Image (cartoon, rainbow, N blue to C red):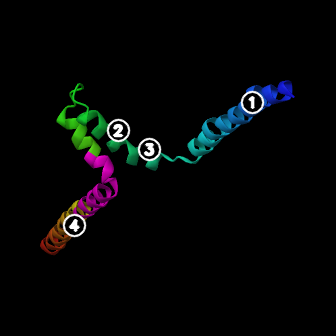
Amino acid sequence: MWKSFWKKWTIDLLAIFGGWLRDLFIVQGAAFLNRVTWRQTLAFLPIVILILAYYRRIPVPPELLLLGDVLAYIDIFAVLLLLSMLSHGARILSIIKRATARVGALTIRLVKKIR
């Protein structure tokens, strides 16, 4: 009776507990890491930077904090960058359009003068 009791408490329950720990930390952890995307990693990076910034023994330069803010709001910065590129492109196209109109008018005047 004591041998079965001893076996149950020293081997069986510890094996069950070890299997549960393995499932929790290894299997579930690997499944979580398989589901992590680059976007989630970039979204988590500012949290790591803030933890390092508030940990008083490690000095964090302000550039890293700005980088963390940029990464945290990467969608907003991407939209602003895209809008600035589009407005810049529209400005370039407007200049090209005016230049081609001037070149066209110049060629028409040259053709009239030649005649």
For the residues carrying marks 1 and 4, which lies nearer the camera in this image? 1
Disc 4 marks a residue whose amino acid type is Thr
Determine the secondary structure under disc 1: helix
Tag 3 residue: 41
Query: Residue 36, position in %: x, y?
Result: 53, 46
Tag 2 residue: 48
Determine the secondary structure under disc 4: helix
Disc 3 marks a residue whose amino acid type is Thr
| Label located before the other in sequence (1 or 4) | 1
Instruction: Specify start and end residues of the magenta stretch as a single range.
Output: 69-87
Would residue 14 be counted in the magenta stretch?
no
Question: Residue drawn at (20%, 27%), measured in percent from left and top?
Answer: 59
In three-dimensional space, the C-alpha distance between marks 4 and 2, rounded to whole angstroms, equals: 53 Å
Tag 4 residue: 100
Query: Residue 7, position in %: x, y?
Result: 81, 26
Question: Residue drawn at (28%, 55%), measured in percent from left and top?
Answer: 77
Q: Residues within 10 Å of mark 4 (few under 14, many from 20)?
A: few
For the residues carrying marks 3 and 1, which lies nearer the camera in this image? 1
Tag 1 residue: 9
In three-dimensional space, the C-alpha distance between marks 1 and 4, rounded to whole angstroms, equals: 90 Å
For the residues carrying marks 4 and 2, which lies nearer the camera in this image? 2
Q: Residues within 10 Å of mark 2 (few under 14, many from 20)?
A: few
Would residue 85 be counted in the magenta stretch?
yes
